[in-house]
Image: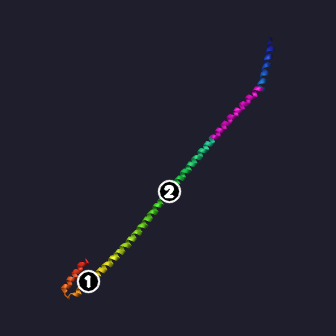
Amino acid sequence: MNINLSLLAQALTFALFIWFTIRFVWPPLMRAIEQRQKHIADGLAAAERGRAELESASKRAEEALREARRRASEVIAQAEKRAAQMIEEARTEAKEEGNREKAAARAEIEQQIAQAKETLREQVATLAVAGAEKILRREVDAKAHAELLDELRLELR
């Protein structure tokens, strides 16, 4: 065998192998590699979007939490203010009720005092009339008058 012919046959076979590989094997391999690259790029892009969305959602959650805390503190402040207002209203009403009860008690006391005075006046008038009647029935005697006045004084006590 001739080495030149062997080299030429090998070169021709190698060229045929390269043509066959370029024509039939290389395009599916390139498509598979391109699809894999595209799939990896899409995955990386989705991961980046997910990370950005996670950061955005985290910021929104923090903002919502801050807003909820602010609103809660406002509600608590309003409740405390309303409670203080209700306490003050209750105090005012209690004072007014106390004043009304005091006025009613004073009026009742004054009425009872007036009634007692009137009763005393009637009793004094009755005693005075009784005393005058006794004095007039007896003879006019200074000693008897003094005794009657002493009795009258004792009755008035």
Q: Main secondary structure of the magenta part?
A: helix
Q: Which residue is mark 1?
A: 130
Counting other residues with Cα less than 10 Å from the Cα at mark 1, is it few (<14), some (14-19), or many (20 or more)? Answer: few
Asked if 102 appears above or below 7 in the picture, the reply is below
Of residues 134 and 40, the one drawn nearer to the viewer in this rendering: 134
Instruction: Tell me the residue at 22%/87% (across/down).
Output: 137
Asked if 66 appears above or below 124 in the picture, the reply is above
Instruction: Tell me the residue at 50%/56% (across/down).
Output: 79
Residue 140: horizontal and vertical position, in percent? 20, 88
Toward the top, the furthest residue is: 1
Mark 2 secondary-structure assignment = helix
Q: Which mark is residue 79?
A: 2
Mark 1 secondary-structure assignment = helix
Image: magenta residue range: 24-50
Instruction: Tell me the residue at 42%/69% (across/down).
Output: 100
Q: Is residue 53 left or right of residue 24?
A: left
Instruction: Tell me the residue at 68%/35% (across/down).
Output: 41
Corner quadrant of residue 115: bottom left
Q: Is residue 25 magenta?
A: yes
Quadrant location of the N terminus in the rendered image: top right
Q: Earlier in the sequence, mark 2 or mark 1?
A: 2
Counting other residues with Cα less than 10 Å from the Cα at mark 2, is it few (<14), some (14-19), or many (20 or more)? Answer: few
Residue 126: horizontal and vertical position, in percent? 28, 82
Q: Is residue 32 left or right of residue 139?
A: right
Query: The residue under label 2 is which amino acid type?
Result: Ala
Q: Which mark is residue 120?
A: none
- Total number of numbered discs in the rendering: 2
Of residues 155 and 78, the one drawn nearer to the viewer in this rendering: 155
Residue 43: horizontal and vertical position, in percent? 66, 36
Asked if 119 appears above or below 10 in the picture, the reply is below
Query: The residue under label 1 is which amino acid type?
Result: Ala
